[in-house]
Amino acid sequence: MKYFVQILLLLLPLSFAYGGVIQPHIVVFGSAEMQVIPDEIKWSLTVKTVGTIAAKVAQKHIVDVDNVLQALAGLGLEKNAVQTTNMQLKENWEYRNNSREKNGYYAFTGIQFTTDDFVTYTDYWTKVTSLANVSVAGVYFALANRTAIEDQVKILAIKQGREKAKGFAAALGAQLGSPILIEELDDGNYFSNEPMYEMAMKSDGGRRKAVSPGREVVRARVKLLFMLE
């Protein structure tokens, strides 16, 4: 019975094993990458207000958050370009002498926004860090047209895969036929999320800017299936 099953599997039509593909075919993987200069800076700020009375902490926190929003508006950032998230008012617990003690309350708000002028980076950094109870949680480079760039790289990967398939077919003394399958192999890791590296440099206007965007490497892989003739 065991040998009968093995023989049966060997005799199964190719269409069963490869989803309807009957003719001889070839499967290849195409890959490509592109180096792109980031054109956006994404900011993540946190506002944390601490106090002994919950109501007063909440009132003071509203003022602290409003001070940040007013400062960003003064730097030219539109109101609808700023997002406030994760608002909290909690008991403030601290560890002292190996024990957990309550020390009043704290209010917390996250603030995110994006800028596209690297020259004004220093202005934003100086202004927000001068405000009370404000911390810079992270500053990252990004691309405004990320999706379009990813699509371009995928097309390059398809072309690279096709050329690879043509070379493989020629090595077999065959010709590449019609494409049957194109599958994106998207692992979601096109862009690095590492924080920016700072480097002082001169801008065209003589002002100093403290960022160097460098280049992001955008990668893509695809799976291709072609008929062989």
Image: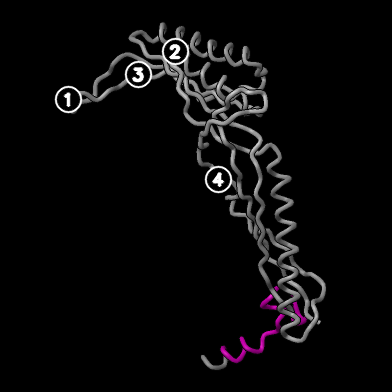
* Residue 6 drawn above or below residue 181: below
In percent of width and height, residue 49 lies at 41, 14
Q: Quadrant of the C terminus?
A: bottom right
Answer whether labels 4 and 1 touch (C-beta < 8 Å): no
Q: Disc 3 designates what residue?
A: 91
Element assignment for label 4? loop
Q: Disc 4 designates what residue?
A: 192
| Residue 97, disc | 1
Element assignment for label 2? loop
Q: Residue at x 77, y 81 (%)?
A: 23
Q: Disc 2 designates what residue?
A: 132
Answer whether labels 2 and 1 touch (C-beta < 8 Å): no
Q: 10 Å neighbourhood of mark 3: few (<14), some, or many (≥20)?
A: some
Give how far apart the Cα atoms at labels 2 and 1 are: 29 Å
Element assignment for label 1? loop
Give how far apart the Cα atoms at labels 4 and 3 are: 36 Å
